[in-house]
Amino acid sequence: MKQLLIWIGLCLLLYGGLGVTMHLYLSANPQKFVIALDTSVYMKERQQQISQELVRLAGRRYSVFSMIVDKGRLLHSWQSRPDTREKIIYYGDRLLSGFTDPSKYSELAQADRILLVSNAEDISELEKIYGNRFTRIAP
């Protein structure tokens, strides 16, 4: 019985140590997400779904977010939550070409994942540039 308790104690100690180690590592090296928002007039009717999606993303642990819009504006750089207080104005045509130049925003080059929030049909150019780091979220 004593050996069983020793084994149980060692297993719990090992499991706890691995959990603490993973937590410390992931806290020091969070996953970086760039949220690229399509702010065209075509997205205006989907404001509620976009807000819900941003709230859902804000719940991710061990992640930092940067938000940019297609009209050439950085809403915010790396933060632990996407800032939903920023007033987003939906106007004009869709300008997804603003996301094709990684040198325009340093965040695009630093990101582990790029999340495009858009209902655009043709995004093949962005998929070619960013490859498997690129994901579209269609609200």
Image: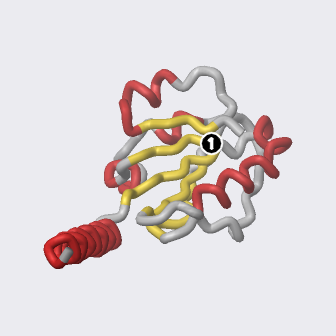
Residue lying furthest right in this view?
Answer: 45
Q: Secondary structure at mark 1?
A: strand
Q: Residues within 10 Å of mark 1 (few under 14, many from 20)?
A: many
Residue 21: name its quadrant. bottom left
- Where residue 122 appears, as percent x and y from the top left, is 59, 21
Image: 54 above or below 139: below
At 36% across and 64% down in the image, what residue appears?
A: 30
What amino acid is found at the position of numbered circle 1 in the picture?
A: Val
Which residue is pictured at 71% across the width and 70% down the height? 85
User: Residue 13, relative to residue 62: is it above or below?
Assistant: below
x then y, percent, for residue 125: 46, 24
- Quadrant of residue 54 within the rendered picture: bottom right
Identify which residue, 7 or 75, lies in the foreground.
7
115 horizontally vs 51: left or right:
left
Is residue 114 among what the camera can see? Answer: yes
Name the residue located 64 percent from the left edge and 22 percent from the top edge: 121
Looking at the picture, how far across and down is residue 98, in whole percent? 52, 41
Q: Nearer the viewer, residue 73 or 20?
A: 20
Q: Which residue is mark 1?
A: 117
